C-alpha cells in the first residue's frame, strides 16, 4: 500500500468537515455534492474487498428512486449480492474517517480482514443517468487506481446489469458473457423461447406501456428492444428526453400516489408498468372499466412467478415446495421481502420479461392476474425514535429481539384481532421504526397498527408526539 500516494490523492477528494454518513442496505445516499470523498474511498475499499475475496467487486453509482440532486454508491460482492455486513461497517468507518486518520483506518481494515495486499484486484464500475454520476464514478476510479487495482468502467448501466457483470466475471463466464450484449442476449433468448410456446399471441398479450422514471431503464430498454420484439412490443414513457429523474414518475411515485405517472395515458384494462430510477424495481398497474386504478406489486408478482414455477415442477413430477416466498412472507411482508431482502437481486427488465412470458403462456389478462390473489387489509406506520439501533430483529425481521418486552407486547396485541399479524423493524437510513399490521378488516388493521406504534413509542424511545389514532 503506497500510503503517501493515498494521502496525496485523498486530499484531492477531501471530506467535508463534520459530515457523517452511514452505509445501509442501499449503500450511501445523500446530496451529490457531498459524495466526492465517499466515492474515492469506496474505490479504495472495493480494491481491499477484491484482494480479500480474490474476486471481481462491483461499484454502482446511483441513488435509485431518490431525486435527481442526490446520488449514492453501493458495492457488489462476488456473486452479485449485497456487501457482507462486516464490510458495511468498514465502509462506514472509512467514509467518516478524517483525512489524518485515513491511513490508520485502511491498515485496520486490511489487518482485521487478513487482506493479502500483494493479491491482484479488479473492480467493475457502473453508473446511472444522474448529471453528477459521471464525475463521481471518476472519483471511484481514482480510488481504485491509487491502491493499484485494475478496473473496467461499464459507464451507464442499470444496477442489476452491474450485478450481472460481477457474477459473470466471477463464474468464469459460465453464467453468461460479462458484456451488455451478453445480458441482452441471455434474457431475450429465454424470453423468446418461452413465449414461442404461447398459444395466445394476440396483441393484448404483446404490447406493454413502460414508465422508465426518466432514468437508465429507458436507455437500456431501447437498446434491448429489438432482441425481444418478436415476443413483446414496449412503448416507453418518461424516457429521459424531457422530464427529471423520478419526478412525478417511476415505481415509487406510482406506488405511493396510487396513480399513473405523469405523461402516460391509460386506456381501461391496458397493462402498464413502472421502473424505478436504477431499474432494479418494477410495479404493474391498470385502470379498470370504471376508471379505478389498480396496483400490482411485489406480492402479486411473487405469486404469479412462484405459482407458475410450481406448476412446471408438478408437470415434470417434482414435488419440491417452492412456494416459500409466497407463503412464509405472505401479504405485506412478501412485498417487503422482495423489496428489501432481494434488493440485490431484483431486476426490473428481467422481472418484466418473466411476467410478460407467464401472462402470455397462461393467457391471463392483467385483471385476471390481479384477481388471483387478494391481500388482507393492512396498515403501515412510522414511529420517530431517538435511536433506531435500540430495535434489533430476527426471523427475517418479523420478531423484535430488543428492546426487552416489545415482542411480548406485540404478541399480546395481535391476539386481540382475527387473522392478524404485526411486526416492527428499524429503518435502514433514519431514526424511524416501521410498523406493519394486518387483520381481517381495515378497521382492525388500523387499530392494531396504532396500538403497536404506541408500544414502540413507549418501549423503544419514541420522540415527538405520541402516535395518534386515525389515518
Ligand atoms: Mg432501485
Image (cartoon, rainbow, N blue to C red):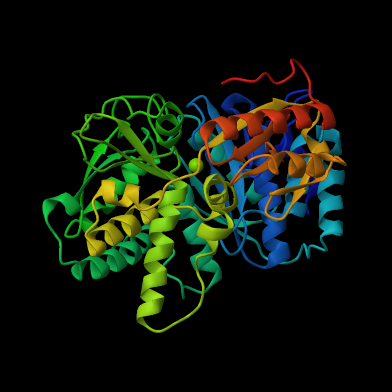
Whether residue 214 is visible, yes or no, is yes
Who is closer to the viewer here, 254 or 54?
254
Whether residue 14 is visible, yes or no, is no
In the displayed structure image, the side of residue 203 where residue 29 appears, left or right: right
Q: Residue furthest bottom?
A: 317
Residue drawn 41% across the image and 52% down it:
301
Residue drawn 55% across the image and 28% down it:
70
| Quarter of the picture holding the C terminus | top right
| Quarter of the picture holding the N terminus | bottom right
Q: To which quarter of the image does residue 238 belong?
A: top left
Position of residue 396 measured from the top left corner of the image (x, y, whole percent): 67, 54
Who is closer to the viewer here, 306 or 126?
306
Position of residue 212 measured from the top left corner of the image (x, y, whole percent): 34, 38
In the displayed structure image, the side of residue 341 where residue 303 appears, left or right: left
Position of residue 126 measured from the top left corner of the image (x, y, whole percent): 49, 48
Q: Residue furthest left?
A: 202
Residue drawn 84% across the image and 45% down it:
105
Q: To which quarter of the image does residue 40 belong?
A: top right
Q: To which quarter of the image does residue 37 belong?
A: top right
Picture mark count: 0
Relative to 292, does residue 182 appear above or below in the rendering?
Answer: below
Relative to 349, does residue 115 appear above or below in the rendering?
Answer: below
Residue drawn 67% across the image and 18% down it:
468
Position of residue 111 measured from the top left corner of the image (x, y, whole percent): 86, 58
Amino acid at each position: 500500500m503506497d500510503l503517501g500516494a493515498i494521502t496525496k490523492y485523498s486530499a484531492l477528494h477531501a471530506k467535508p468537515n463534520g459530515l457523517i454518513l452511514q452505509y445501509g442496505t442501499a449503500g450511501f445516499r445523500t446530496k451529490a455534492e457531498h459524495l466526492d470523498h465517499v466515492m474515492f474511498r469506496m474505490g479504495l475499499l472495493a480494491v481491499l474487498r477484491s484482494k480479500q475475496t480474490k474476486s471481481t467487486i462491483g461499484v454502482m453509482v446511483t441513488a435509485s428512486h431518490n431525486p435527481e440532486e442526490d446520488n449514492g454508491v453501493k458495492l457488489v460482492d462476488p456473486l452479485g449480492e449485497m456487501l457482507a455486513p462486516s464490510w458495511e461497517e468498514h465502509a462506514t468507518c472509512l467514509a467518516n474517517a478524517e483525512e489524518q486518520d485515513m491511513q490508520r483506518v485502511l491498515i485496520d481494515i486490511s489487518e482485521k480482514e487478513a487482506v493479502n495486499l500483494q493479491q491482484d484486484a479488479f473492480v467493475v464500475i457502473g453508473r446511472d443517468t444522474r448529471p453528477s454520476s459521471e464525475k463521481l464514478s471518476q472519483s471511484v476510479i481514482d480510488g481504485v487506481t491509487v491502491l493499484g487495482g485494475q478496473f473496467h468502467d461499464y459507464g451507464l448501466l442499470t444496477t442489476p446489469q452491474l450485478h450481472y457483470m460481477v457474477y459473470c466475471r466471477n463464474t468464469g463466464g459460465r453464467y453468461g458473457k460479462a458484456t451488455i450484449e451478453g445480458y441482452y442476449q441471455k434474457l431475450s433468448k429465454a424470453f423468446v423461447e418461452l413465449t414461442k410456446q404461447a398459444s395466445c399471441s394476440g396483441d393484448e398479450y404483446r404490447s406493454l406501456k413502460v414508465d422508465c422514471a426518466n432514468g437508465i431503464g429507458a436507455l437500456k430498454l431501447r437498446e434491448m428492444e429489438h432482441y425481444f420484439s418478436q415476443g413483446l412490443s414496449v412503448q416507453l414513457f418518461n424516457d429521459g428526453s424531457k422530464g427529471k429523474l423520478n419526478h412525478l414518475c417511476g415505481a415509487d411515485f406510482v406506488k405511493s400516489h396510487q396513480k399513473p405517472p405523469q405523461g402516460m395515458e391509460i386506456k381501461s384494462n391496458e397493462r402498464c408498468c413502472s421502473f424505478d430510477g436504477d431499474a432494479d424495481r418494477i410495479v404493474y398497474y391498470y385502470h379498470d372499466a370504471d376508471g379505478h386504478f389498480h396496483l400490482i406489486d411485489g406480492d402479486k408478482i411473487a405469486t404469479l412467478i412462484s405459482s407458475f414455477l410450481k406448476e412446471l415442477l408438478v408437470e415434470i413430477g417434482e414435488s419440491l415446495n417452492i412456494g416459500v416466498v409466497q407463503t412464509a412472507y405472505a401479504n405485506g411482508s412478501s412485498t417487503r421481502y422482495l423489496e428489501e431482502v432481494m434488493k440485490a437481486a431484483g431486476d426490473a427488465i428481467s422481472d418484466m420479461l418473466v411476467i410478460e412470458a407467464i401472462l402470455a403462456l397462461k393467457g391471463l389478462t392483467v385483471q385476471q392476474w390481479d384477481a388471483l390473489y387478494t391481500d388482507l387489509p393492512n396498515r403501515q406506520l412510522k414511529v420517530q425514535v431517538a435511536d433506531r439501533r435500540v430495535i434489533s430483529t430476527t426471523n427475517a425481521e418479523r420478531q423484535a429481539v430488543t428492546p426487552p418486552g416489545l415482542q411480548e407486547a406485540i404478541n399480546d396485541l395481535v391476539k386481540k384481532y382475527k387473522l392478524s399479524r404485526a411486526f416492527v423493524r428499524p429503518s435502514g437510513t433514519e431514526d424511524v421504526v416501521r410498523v406493519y399490521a394486518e387483520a381481517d378488516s381495515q378497521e382492525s388493521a388500523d387499530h392494531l397498527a396504532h396500538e403497536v406504534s404506541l408500544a414502540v413509542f413507549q418501549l423503544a424511545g419514541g420522540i415527538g408526539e405520541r402516535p395518534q389514532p386515525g389515518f
